[in-house]
Image (cartoon, rainbow, N blue to C red):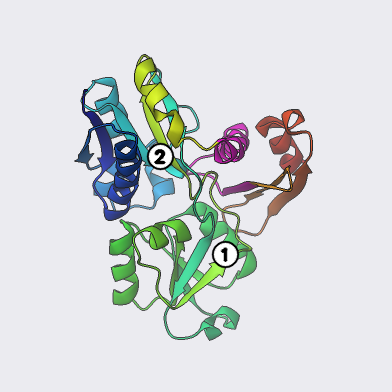
Amino acid sequence: MNTIRIGTRDSELALWQAKTVQNQLKTLGYPTEIVSTKSHGDIELSKPLYEMGVTGIFTKALDIALLNSEIDIAVHSMKDVPTALPEGIVVGAVLKRGNPHDVLVYKGDLSFLEAEIATIATSSLRRKAQWLHRYPHHNIENLRGNVNTRLQKLTDNSWNGAIFAAAGLERINKLPEKHLVLDWMLPAPAQGAIVVVVREDNVALQKKLLPLHDDYTYIATQLERDFLRALEGGCTAPIGAFAEFKDEKLYFKGGLWSEDGKESSVIDEVLTQIDEYTGEKLATMVRS
């Protein structure tokens, strides 16, 4: 039996995700090995993501390795994956979603939330816009790097807090006691989900990945990503979306903000006839 080569970035979180897939494949009886690499997004840390203007900044290196048959599958945080996959690459599995929310990791106490002057760190335009919409007098500082690097930068600087994806901190047991769940902040489309991609022509491997796949997560995240694509968004647009199944209904909330957070348009829908709602239709609603 051929060993399945699992491609991943080399950060602690990315390796956790790859090992999660590895363990599930091992349970199914398949031999595997992990092949790690650095992405351009891991190397260039001086600029905010929205200034870099590179689609697939965290996935391109693995896409090339996959298409060159240097690896057999690649494991990604789904929110980092462009809404249009490269030609020849398809989704093999979407794992059951983890925590979709953002959290504020802070120092001291939370009195700064009501202060006129405070500094919050994030490189995400989506997080920046939503934070400024709620706290227009606060300052936003750029914060790049993997989870551990960003936590250390928060410690080393005089910032009041920094915003992280809850799932990332939870998965590597780095969620500090001093954190606040930002349940009012719309997450990035597909935040908290892990996706496995594979070459389109490798049908045999696609079949092996099927037991890892969670349909509910796939349907919800595809709607979020279709919404993002319809708004022509990505790392350069302040767009948030979240869909979840409850009581056999799909609840969808999506939003679009101006970069300074002053303007916003948010929709909140209960989709009883799921097939009637597309990302384009929901995008039209938020535009109006």
Q: Which residues are magenta?
A: 215-243
Residue 162 occupies which quadrant of the picture? bottom left
Q: Amino acid at mark 2?
A: Gly
- Where in the figure is residue 277, as x and y percent of width and height? 73, 32
- Where in the figure is residue 119, as x and y percent of width and height? 46, 73
Identify the residue under disc 2.
53
- Where in the figure is residue 235, as x and y percent of width and height? 47, 44
Q: Pick the quarter of the image with the C terminus.
A: top right
SS type, badge 1? helix
Residue at image point 39% right, 16% down: 203
Q: 288 left or right of 173? A: right
Residue 194 occupies which quadrant of the picture? top left
Front-most of 130 and 80? 80
Does the image show residue 142?
Answer: no
Q: 92 left or right of 188? A: left
Report the residue that reaches farthest toward the top: 201
Identify the residue under disc 1.
131
| Other residues around mark 1 within 10 Å, as few (<14) / some (14–19) / many (≥20) | many
Residue at image point 69% right, 31% down: 278
SS type, badge 2? loop
